Amino acid sequence: MKIPRIAYAAYGFAIVVIVLDQLSKAWVVGGLDLPEVRQIVVWESIFNLTWVRNFGVSFGLFGDGSARWLLTVFSIGVSVVLAVWATRTNRRLLISAIGLVMGGALGNVIDRIRFGYVVDFLDFSGLGFPWVFNIADAAINIGVALLILDAVISERAGKRQAGDTVGENRAL
């Protein structure tokens, strides 16, 4: 199977996300010793670095760690599906979205395999965000938002093209 050149962009985005995610986690765990101090105030009432071991998924689901391997396998499966999807599209926005989600999922998989939990540390609770997250989580959320945006744009473009075709048929 020949991989289209544009698919490599998705894989590149994924690699960049994984590297940034893992480097930031290494810095937080090793360089800052955040596990020992638990929290570093960066910007009073806005942003902190806060140590959280996330054994589950969003909103505390599976927080007891019971689904560690299920979540790992699921995330790898999603990443494989996304990698294949990247070979079947030529839309740049969709490629970017796929790469971000794939990289974020695999960044968190690395944590689940290494530690048994995901390292979270970005804390914007001062702005009203009730959860602590990491770069991989941010990439997944941005990627999902881009997937939705791509779907909306594609649907509108499809309706415009369908309208143009109907108009051409009427003119005949």
Image (cartoon, rainbow, N blue to C red):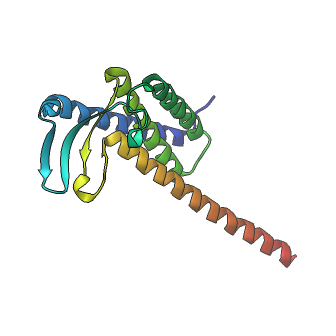
Q: Residue at x 74, y 66 (%)?
A: 162
Query: Residue most toward the bottom?
Result: 171
Query: Residue most toward the right?
Result: 172
Nearest the viewer among 154 and 60 is 60
Give residue 54's quadrant in the image. Answer: top left
Camera sees residue 167:
yes
Which quarter of the image is occupied by the N terminus? top right
With respect to residue 73, does 128 lie above or below? below
Q: Residue at x 62, y 65 (%)?
A: 156
Q: Position of residue 18 (x, y in %)?
A: 36, 34
User: How many circles with numbers are drawn on the protein?
Assistant: 0
Query: Image check: 110 left or right of 40?
Result: right
Q: Position of residue 90 (x, y in %)?
A: 58, 48
Q: Position of residue 7 (x, y in %)?
A: 53, 39
Q: Position of residue 45 (x, y in %)?
A: 16, 57
Query: Image check: 108 left or right of 128?
Result: right
Nearest the viewer among 104 and 36 is 36
With respect to residue 47, does 111 lie above or below? above
Give residue 111's quadrant in the image. Answer: top left
Nearest the viewer among 68 and 135 is 68
Query: Image check: 45 left or right of 161?
Result: left
Which quarter of the image is occupied by the C terminus? bottom right
Camera sees residue 9:
no
Q: Residue at x 41, y 50 (%)?
A: 142
Query: Image check: 163 left or right of 98?
Result: right
Q: Residue at x 19, y 52 (%)?
A: 47
